[in-house]
Image (cartoon, coloured by chain):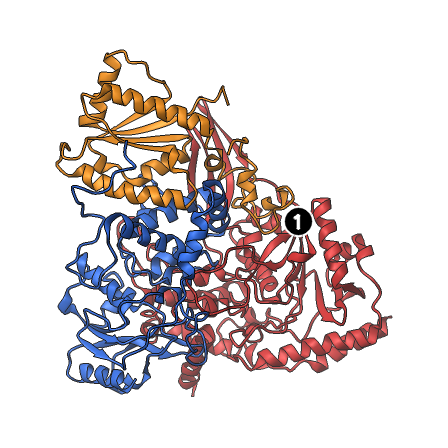
């Protein structure tokens, strides 16, 4: 933690950045903080509650953040993949942000706790399963001690397998039940680092492709579209599901498409911006056994 | 379901499939008449939302068809479509929309016979599956979304399960 | 009988800590008359008739009976969904307000339902009318009529929101759909044991047993609930379902236990937040451009979850949706001032162009504009916004910070 705070202090003191975006202790748990003065750097913390994907704050449309000036962003390895996505898609310049990577051994699913919960198979967030970036790539500075592997918890894949084992009608009934609660609040979109469009397709009214009314038909259209637009880009941070006020298991949908792009196009989301995303690219010998 | 005539919407590319369909017509090939064709410049232009919209607006099945790989009039449009629909198909399936309701095909300008085959086989397959009532009934007078008390009217076993509401609209075939 | 009643209300007054006196102060507001309308939890109206006893079992029968008779009963219930997948911390099972038909579903007094009662009066999507073209004519069919409904065991913070929102719904026009649902619904609140330290009902002129908006109130006692009716509607419901309600096993002991429950809850929540609303309003009125807003805006995602879960947020969007060629519906759908397009003009100009401005709007609407216009703070202290916010915005913390600045200004 001291290493993190010292790094932040140095970056601010030397004028390399104007703001350090990291985590602080809030009243109920940890939450994002925007540190603009060296004196405030001791507010920065990092522990197993630091689940947020802070890459969301790099969205250039967030003028209230951009106006703070050049930022240093504290990232876990998974968060760095989101930053790589923004770089890959030319939303930010590499020299427009300083990345402070923290070595991470896993986080829990909720930042709300008075202090850092221990990681067990039950408490660890699903996204930490089979994590390959405990040492974040892409970063400018790396802080923190090397961490052990997070406890295994393949529940996400298990639940997907269970759904896949059902027939289409049963799956439809499952998703109709889950998606009927959706109020199309778009918290899932707002929490997502890769949903950065200045004008989202759902706000297009001529024509209105996606019905904004939160009835099951509109909700299916919304979630089908968001999932499709994230295919191959989603880093699996689970922030969409955490943000959802009615507990829709959105992580299942996005994780499913991660599995699909791996199976079909041998692609896993990378923290190297030079590796192209699968949708938008193609190979002349792509699988086409579904095409007559 | 002998008297059920499926409604099929076909999104086809102008250069290959549309011309192939035209050839099927001028060759007087026997084809089911359930298909309404929408002509696009290229399968690369076909957004996944077209398929969703077709189902929303009453289609029971959808055909998406274009040029064979390496034959795209715009060079790579169909390659992009192939990837896009490779993924979208799995997404539809995962959310419970049976991918058997959607046919993807490569039909060239000279393949009138193949087009007729795609049309006929799609119509028969969707006829067997029955009308897509579960999707068409997603919003109705008694949808839980319209009226928070609507789930109350669904039959027994509906406690906490608003999925029962749309299901009760289906004709029967599932 | 009347002696018992007087004694009961006297003892309630004595038991209630008078924390609201400073809060209800009007001195520092120009429009002092407005805030006088706010009533603290302490001075509650008298119950109509005798208190009754509803055993937990009888509550189940009551719900089943209502279901069989075709009257929707809305109650806190165990959420019937698959549960979150990406989380890793074992939360208690979620609850929601839902039309229930069986005892097994009921979750009264368990975790705070994730959405408020709002969805039953202002649904997330609501048909305003349907239209159908008939040659040159257009047929309009109005929305479905509201049906008689009862709410059993809702939190006082959720119930109090209803009369608060009534005011804007009857301001420049009478919102028929909202009013119809309100008129058709009988609401019984459940005295709350206080969810956690994000609650601050007592800081907004309410409390864990507040009666604002309640036709009746349930308070947990041994074996079930002590039930009081406070309006004719509430009394009529009790009378109409008399066989579910029994005499209190021991009236004075039960009443004392109920009052003790309520008093303990009031004490529990009182410490969570205390602000001077007059001073708060004054500060908000004079610090539109304060750098304070830039300390809140950056963290906010602009997701509007706070508005979805809020019992008093009521903004909506109106859309026309074709269902077929020549026919369709006009709907209103939940909306939120926190999205970037909420105030986007057709010209491209956006008067609330960044999240600092949008977040400021949220606070100002709730704690300045609405009280000045309607005499009620647009907040019932349920704390959902703080719990649901993905980035940790904390309403109690924000109000404390503003109040502290206001106090500094005043000194």
Q: Is residue C226 left or right of residue C314?
A: right
Residue count near mark 1 (Cα–Cα under 10 Å), binned few <14, some 14–19, many ≥20: many
Q: Is residue B165 above or below residue B37?
A: below
Q: Position of residue A251 (x, y in %)?
A: 39, 57
Residue at label 1? Answer: C72
**Outermost residue to the right:** C1
Apparent side of residue A201 relative to residue C400 in the rendered image (left or right): left
Q: Residue C377: horizontal and vertical position, in percent?
A: 52, 68
Residue C114, percent from left and from top: 53, 62
- The answer to whether one can see residue A61 in this image is yes
| Chain B shade | orange
Helix, strand, or loop for circle 1? loop
Position in image of residue B74 (x %, y %)? 13, 35
Image: C211 above or below C152:
below
| Front residue (pair C151, B158) | B158
Query: Can residue A184 be seen in the rendering of this structure?
Result: no
User: Does residue C366 appear to the left or right of C225 in the view shown?
Assistant: left
Q: Is residue C405 left or right of residue B106?
A: right
Nearest to the observer: residue A143 or residue C232: A143
| Farthest-out residue, top | B28
At horizontal 63% and vertical 41% (from top left) the residue drawn is: B155
Chain containing the residue with disc 1 = C
> In blue, which chain?
A
Q: How many marks?
A: 1
Color of chain C here? red
Q: Residue at x 52, y 56 (%)?
A: C168
């Amino acid at each position: 933690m001291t290493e993190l705070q010292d790094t932040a202090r140095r970056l601010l003191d030397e004028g390399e950045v104007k703001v350090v975006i990291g985590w602080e202790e809030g009243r109920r748990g940890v939450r994002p903080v925007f540190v603009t003065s060296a004196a405030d750097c001791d507010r920065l913390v990092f522990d197993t509650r630091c689940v947020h994907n802070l890459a969301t704050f790099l969205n250039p449309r967030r003028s209230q953040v951009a106006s703070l000036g050049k930022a240093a962003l504290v990232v876990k390895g998974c968060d760095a993949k989101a930053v790589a996505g923004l770089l890959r898609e030319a939303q930010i310049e590499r020299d427009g942000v300083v990345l402070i990577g923290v070595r991470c051994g896993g986080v829990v699913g909720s930042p709300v706790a008075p202090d850092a919960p221990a990681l067990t198979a039950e408490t660890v967030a699903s996204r930490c399963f089979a994590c390959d970036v405990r040492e974040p790539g892409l970063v400018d500075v790396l802080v923190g001690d090397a961490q052990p592997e997070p406890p295994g918890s393949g529940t996400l894949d298990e639940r997907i397998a269970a759904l896949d084992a059902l027939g289409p009608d049963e799956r439809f009934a499952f998703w109709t039940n889950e998606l009927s609660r959706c109020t199309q609040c778009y918290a899932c979109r707002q929490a997502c680092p890769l949903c950065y469009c200045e004008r989202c397709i759902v706000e297009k009214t001529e024509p209105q492709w996606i019905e904004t009314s939160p009835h099951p038909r509109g909700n299916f259209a919304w979630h089908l579209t968001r999932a499709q637009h994230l295919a191959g880009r989603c880093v699996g941070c689970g922030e969409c599901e955490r943000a959802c006020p009615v507990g829709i298991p959105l992580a299942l949908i996005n994780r499913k498409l991660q599995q699909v792009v791996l199976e079909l196009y041998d692609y896993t989301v990378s923290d190297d911006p030079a590796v192209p995303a699968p949708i938008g690219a193609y190979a002349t010998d792509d699988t086409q056994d579904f095409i007559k | 379901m002998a008297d059920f005539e499926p409604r099929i919407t076909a999104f086809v590319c102008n250069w290959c499939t549309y011309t192939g369909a035209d050839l099927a017509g001028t060759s007087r090939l026997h084809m089911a008449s359930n298909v309404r064709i929408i002509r696009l410049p290229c399968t690369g232009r076909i957004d996944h939302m077209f398929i969703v919209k077709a189902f929303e607006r009453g289609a029971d099945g959808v055909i998406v068809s274009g040029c064979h790989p390496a034959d795209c009039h715009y060079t790579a449009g169909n390659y992009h479509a192939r990837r896009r629909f490779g993924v979208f198909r799995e997404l539809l399936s995962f959310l419970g929309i049976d991918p058997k309701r959607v046919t993807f095909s490569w039909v060239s300008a000279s393949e009138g016979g193949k087009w007729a085959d795609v049309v006929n086989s799609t119509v028969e397959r969707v006829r067997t599956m029955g009308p897509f009532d579960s999707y068409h009934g997603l919003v109705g007078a008694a949808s839980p979304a319209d009226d928070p008390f609507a789930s109350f009217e669904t039959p027994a076993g509906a406690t906490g399960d608003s999925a029962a509401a749309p299901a009760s609209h289906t004709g029967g075939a599932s | 009988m009347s002696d018992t009643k007087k004694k009961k209300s006297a003892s309630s007054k004595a038991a209630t800590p008078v924390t609201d006196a400073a809060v209800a102060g009007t001195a520092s507001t120009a429009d002092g008359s407005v805030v006088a309308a706010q009533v603290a939890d302490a001075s509650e109206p008298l119950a109509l008739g005798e208190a009754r006893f509803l055993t937990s079992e009888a509550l189940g029968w009551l719900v089943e009976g209502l279901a069989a008779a075709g009257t929707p009963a809305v109650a806190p219930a165990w959420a019937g969904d698959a549960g979150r997948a990406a989380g890793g911390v074992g939360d208690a099972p979620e609850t929601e307000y839902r039309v229930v038909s069986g005892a097994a579903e009921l979750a009264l007094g368990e975790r705070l339902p994730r959405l408020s009662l709002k969805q039953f009066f202002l649904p997330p999507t609501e048909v305003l009318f349907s239209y159908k073209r008939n040659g040159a004519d257009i047929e309009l069919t109005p929305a479905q009529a509201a049906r008689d409904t009862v709410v059993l065991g809702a939190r006082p913070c959720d119930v109090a929101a209803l009369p608060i929102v009534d005011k804007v719904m009857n301001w420049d026009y009478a919102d028929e759909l909202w009013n119809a649902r309100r008129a058709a619904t009988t609401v019984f609140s459940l005295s709350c044991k206080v969810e956690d330290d994000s609650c601050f009902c007592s800081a907004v002129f309410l409390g864990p047993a507040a009666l604002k908006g309640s036709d009746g109130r349930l308070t947990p006692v041994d074996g079930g609930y002590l039930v009081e009716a406070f309006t004719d509607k509430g009394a009529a419901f009790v009378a109409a379902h008399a066989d579910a309600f029994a005499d209190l096993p021991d009236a004075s002991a039960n009443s004392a236990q109920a009052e003790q429950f309520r008093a303990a809850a009031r004490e529990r929540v009182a410490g969570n937040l205390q602000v001077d609303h007059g001073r708060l309003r004054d500060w908000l009125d004079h610090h539109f451009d304060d750098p304070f807003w830039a300390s809140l805006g950056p963290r906010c995602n602009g997701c509007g979850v706070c508005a979805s879960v809020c019992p008093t947020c009521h903004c909506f969007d109106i859309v026309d949706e074709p269902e077929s060629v020549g026919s369709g519906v006009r709907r209103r759908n939940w909306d939120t001032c926190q999205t970037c397009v909420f105030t986007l003009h057709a010209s491209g100009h956006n008067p609330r162009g960044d999240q600092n401005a949008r977040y400021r709007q949220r606070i100002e609407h709730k704690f300045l504009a609405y009280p000045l216009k309607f005499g009620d703070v647009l907040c019932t202290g349920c704390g959902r916004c703080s719990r649901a916010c993905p980035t940790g915005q904390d309403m109690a913390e924000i109000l404390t910070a503003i109040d502290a600045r206001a106090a500094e200004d005043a000194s």
